[in-house]
Image (tube, grey):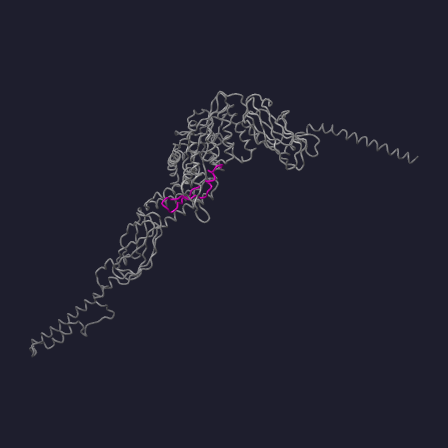
Amino acid sequence: MAEAAGFQGSERPRGRWLRRAAALIAGVPLLAGMVQIPAAPEAHAAGSRTVDVSVDALTPSAPKKDDTLTVSGTLTNGSNAPITDAHVGLRRGPALNSRSAIDTAAKRTGFSPGADGQEIENRTQKIDRLDPGVSRTFTLHVPVKDLDLGDDGVYQLGVSLSGRSQGASYEQVLGIERTFLPWQTSDVGKKTQLTYLWPLISSTHLTAETDADAEQTPVFRNDNLASEIAPGGRLQQLVALGKDLPVTFVIDPDVLASVDAMTRTYKVEGPNGPTAGKNQAVAKQWLKQVEEAVKTHEVVALPFADPDLASLAHRGKEVPSALGHLGPATSLAAKTVETVLGVKARTDFAWPAEGAVDSSIVDVATSGGAHNIIARSDSLQENSLSYSPTAARPIGGGNTAIVADAGLSTAFEGDLSKAENSTLAIQQFLAQSLMINGQEPGQQRNIVVAPQRTPSVSQAQAMAAGVKNLVPGRWAEQLNLAGAAKAAPDPGANREVPAAAEYPAALRKQELPTEGFEEIQDTQTALDDFAPVLAQPGRVVTPFGNAIMREMSTEWRGDEAGAAAFRSSVRTYLDGLTKNVQLIQKSPATLSGRSATIPVTVQNNLVQGVKGLTLELTSSQPNRLDTGEPQEITVDGGHSQSFKFDTTANANGPVQVTAQLYTSDGKPYGRPMTFQVNVTEITSTIMLVIAGGVLLLVLAGVRIYLQRKRAASGRDGDGTNGDGTDGDGGSEGGNGGDGTDGDKPVQPGDREPDTGSESTDASGSGEKVDR
């Protein structure tokens, strides 16, 4: 009993503990419900990043009242646990009241109940299970009337996935993606005039090199241009998309010139030397497409090779000749477009990189003939206006700044190869344009869009979709660039061009260095010296002149190594051509005579002839050897020719002679050639020998005279010989007749008096010179 009593007594506390535990467990849901209200935002913020939701398509982009909105995309479970009992739905957020509000909404991540709105009922798609790492597509069809849109404007749309994750006993938002819906029920009274620039610009493809043939076959750096103009290529897509859009084509004429060169025989650099190009048909087809497209569009031509105006203004101005290339590049641009496409292009527009301008850039641009400068609103910023003003701004000196909208101009940058990025860019572009129109609905304004210079295929496709859905539309209409330049400026818009010191530091770092412009100047000087000596200078001046313009291209921004390599290749090739006209090295020559001819050979390995060069010999000792007068030379292409110089020697010994070619203005051409001339018999030696011989003859004559005088004196004293002759006459006369009397002084080493080399007469032109 005691044991039983003891057991019963011990059971009562245990039962109370069990009852209390059961009550506590039963109260957990209520407690969870009580603490869920303040904790919900934090839980949702963490959970709403579990699933990646992408909106890959939204049509129509700007719906009307009776339309049905179709939204499709992809769901990807980024967690390590499955998602169950889920569904995807559409949420209509509040109307946005400013352009900055659109930007803020685009950057926000995670679910926010107040900002993202309620889910549209009965328009969801069920997702039973989504395993870790698995992706699944979805499509929602929602009548626009179900969105319950109010006044015209821009609304935020959200696509969310709601469901249960592992360990969660209730449904929550596990992923969300936002986009924008422009809502305009009818046409506005004052539509925004939109000017969209459509760039046909590429990198540098042609080198300065041409094949050594009559056709001057051009050589390309690579075959990348063929890929760009082939079906599906970047440039091909820009033309195909742009021809049906209300845009202004902005063309770098270098692209046209390069593709035109591809329509004929061309070569491509390779590891084993240039090889034949094979894309003539592709080039012809692309040019035909461009020709058709521009017939109905405005065409603006940038200066040839799209020179970097900011680099010229900030670095090139320190090199005297740098700015001199801009005018010819503008003239060549007009000529190229008209020749290749058969249309006249506007060349009075300048487009600095990324629309960044300052006073020095404006000065450089106008010096090249441009009076309309395409700037961007993040460079020429507004100080007080609460709306986006008309693009045109007079900036003094008869010049106009065309200020493109920065937000719209950068809307299609980044990686748009992903459908979700492209769709968001299109919707954001449309939303921003509607917001601009709503800023001042009673005032018509012109907005210019200047996108990136070389959009990719995916970027171009997104741009085309944005423009196509906007113009012509309910709140925008098209205006070409010429019209934008003439539009009445907004009196309150900023017209003050920034000073050079205000140019963005990040962009300044990308500019060509001053040393680069100095190298360009050196190459131009070398070309100027080379051209006058050529029989057909155009064969060299044209390809090298174009290459020098390409050395200043905006393409090289941020690619200093690539720019330096291209400059080096141009100069190396030019130096190689100039060295094809050279002097052939002579071996030492021996000059045996008072005068002789020395031949010097000029070799011309160029395809064309050379002229206007002067060949001059210079003696290191002019008092010993006179090398004669300089000679003007002409040598046919692929030939060598010798030129003879009449020389005069005055003394024995070796003499260094230097041969040098000179241009017509007296500049040395090529390397000098030095050789040695050994003078073995000189006029002074010969004269000494002759003088010695004459002296001997005089002495002999005097001796004979004295002998005869003595003989005459003898006859006067003691008569004559028996035979009537002088007693000494036979012997003296005989010896004196041959001049070989034993008393006659003889000098050792005397040469024969009839030796030809002792003649004092000048040798003939046929005198031989041992080399």
Q: Is residue 306 above or below residue 713?
A: above
Q: Nearer the viewer, residue 434 or 526?
A: 434
Q: Nearer the viewer, residue 114 or 203?
A: 203
The image quarter containing residue 57 is top right
On the question of residue 146 being in view, the answer is: yes
Total of numbered circles in the picture? 0
On the question of residue 317 being in view, the answer is: no
Indicate the position of residue 652 as horizontal and vertical percent values. Answer: 28, 62
Indicate the position of residue 384 as horizontal and vertical percent values. Answer: 49, 26
Q: Is residue 271 above or below residue 249?
A: below
Indicate the position of residue 566 as horizontal and vertical percent values. Answer: 44, 44
Range of magenta residues = 205-232
Can residue 220 be found in the magenta stretch?
yes
Q: Say which quadrant the C terminus sits in.
A: bottom left
Q: Say which quadrant the N terminus sits in.
A: top right
- Relative to residue 104, is residue 5 drawn left or right? right
Indicate the position of residue 61 as horizontal and vertical percent values. Answer: 54, 27
Q: Residue furthest front?
A: 281
